[in-house]
Image (cartoon, rainbow, N blue to C red):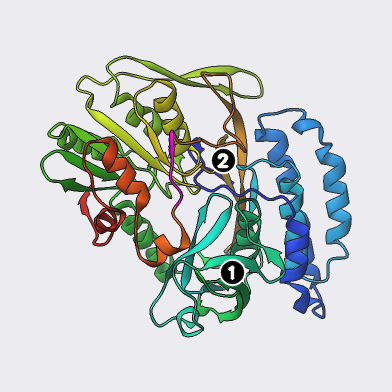
Amino acid sequence: MRRSPLSLGVRSVRILVLGAVLGCAIASELSAQLPRQERERALKMLEQMRQDLHEYYYDSTFGGIDIDARARRADSLIRVAPTMAHALGQVAQYLADLKDSHTSFHPPRHVARLDFGFSWLIVGDSVFISGVKKGSDAEAKGLKRGDLLLAFDKFRSTRQSLRVIAYVYFALSPRPTISLTVVSPGEQPRKLSIDAKITEGKRTIDYTNIDELSQIISDMEDASRKATNFYRTVGDSVLIWRMPRFSYADEMAIDHMIDRAQRYRGVVLDLRDNPGGYIETLRYLTGRFFDRDITMYTAKERKKSTLIVANAAKKPYLGKLVVLVNANSASSSEMFSRTLQLQGRAPIVGDRSAGAVITAVSVGHVVGFERVLQYGASMSVADVVMIDGQRLENVGVMPDHRVLPTGSDLAARRDPQMAKALELVGVNVTPEQAAQYNKVEPKQEN
């Protein structure tokens, strides 16, 4: 078993109606026969999830759910499951019943990696296509940046349903072809069948194979060298700082950015699409914007409650600060934003954040011995209550200035959110001009 350092939202999935989506996604597999060994593996995974809940979950009452009775029910369904996808779906649903953004099943990785060649953005309660790769089947089929994504197969795409759909279609039971219903600005809806680019991989890892082990180590080293902070300047007055995630042991990179920020009267901190990360990084970043200690929130664990405090920095940045968030800003990025908002330190601009705010750990497990099949889960270990007594879970941070880009904005590559943020630090630009700050890869601080 492997347990990661305490973190916030490195991986979060809100699963509400998983069974219905899964049933549609894998309907074509019903003629398959699940081998006994695969069924036994699924049963073992389920039992391990039950044990993990008893060991880690912050609420000993599990929100009033009898998790042992639920496990017995899932066990009986796995024993008659026609496919491994159905069996793993029962394991996933078992955790999903808690309706907790940070408690979810991490299924074994699939043999092949699928790339459908497009990305999306949640805006308000809608979902838009935010990018289409050149040369992809999505481009060939006519999918466009700025298209409103109405549905995956029969399932309507909304802020609430998309995380379920994404989990099923891209993690639990990937399909080589997906059906989308989309509509371009000013046009009629159309249906597209999009094929994925498939890259073959390995379902199992042989840790006795020196070549495989060397590749794993190399990949880990490459990941550790990736830049975690990017910046641009607007004249000699404003620094735009983009932080993609709250990475482990990122204090030095944050110090470099704060030192650079001291030269500017205003900073726009862009946390859009930031999924969160480590608590210590969250505390450290928060402290760099205050000249006094700040109580951020209360972490309510199973047996105790702890006040989480960000300690004041010796040389904090005390200039004008604006924070950008969107619907993909989750966990640590939400707690940082809400703390600054409650303290009156910075206005928040953008869209309501994800509302995925519970402290969690990642636990890993294996099936097999030398040739290993890996799986795991995210387990919530503490609830989070902000200093105003409110939870952000399933609520999110509502910006002081809510700015929702339209499909036409995305199609034309306009960024009204950045334009508003810059306006608040004294720089007036059009949304077209503001988008220029996102076009070319910024300089990096490592």
Q: Disc 1 versus disc 2: distance between alpha carbons?
A: 26 Å
Q: Quadrant of residue 318?
A: top left
- Looking at this rendering, what residue extends furthest in the front direction? 186
Foreground: disc 1 or disc 2: 2
- On the image, the x and y values in percent for residue 165 come to 64, 61
Q: Are marks 1 and 2 in contact (CB under 8 Å)?
A: no
| Residue 22 at least partly seen | yes
Q: Nearer the viewer, residue 294 or 350?
A: 350
The answer to whether residue 266 is magenta is no
**Residue at point 37%, 34% (across, down):** 281
Residue 88 versus residue 16 in the image, above or below: below
Which residue has dot 2 on it?
356
Secondary structure of the residue carrying tag 1 is loop
Is 410 positioned to the left or the right of 178 in the image? left
Q: Which residues are magenta?
A: 400-404
Residue 104 versus residue 334 in the image, above or below: below
- On the image, the x and y values in percent for residue 29 come to 76, 77
Mark sitting on residue 110 = 1
Residue 110 versus residue 11 in the image, above or below: below
Mark sitting on residue 357 = none
| Mark 1 crowdedness (10 Å alpha carbons): few <14, some 14-19, many ≥20 | some
**Residue at point 21%, 51% (across, down):** 444
Is 118 positioned to the left or the right of 56 in the image? left
**Residue at point 36%, 51% (across, down):** 416
Secondary structure of the residue carrying tag 2 is loop
Disc 2 residue type (three-letter): Ala
Which sits earlier in the primary sequence, circle 1 or circle 2? 1
- On the image, the x and y values in percent for residue 427 come to 21, 42
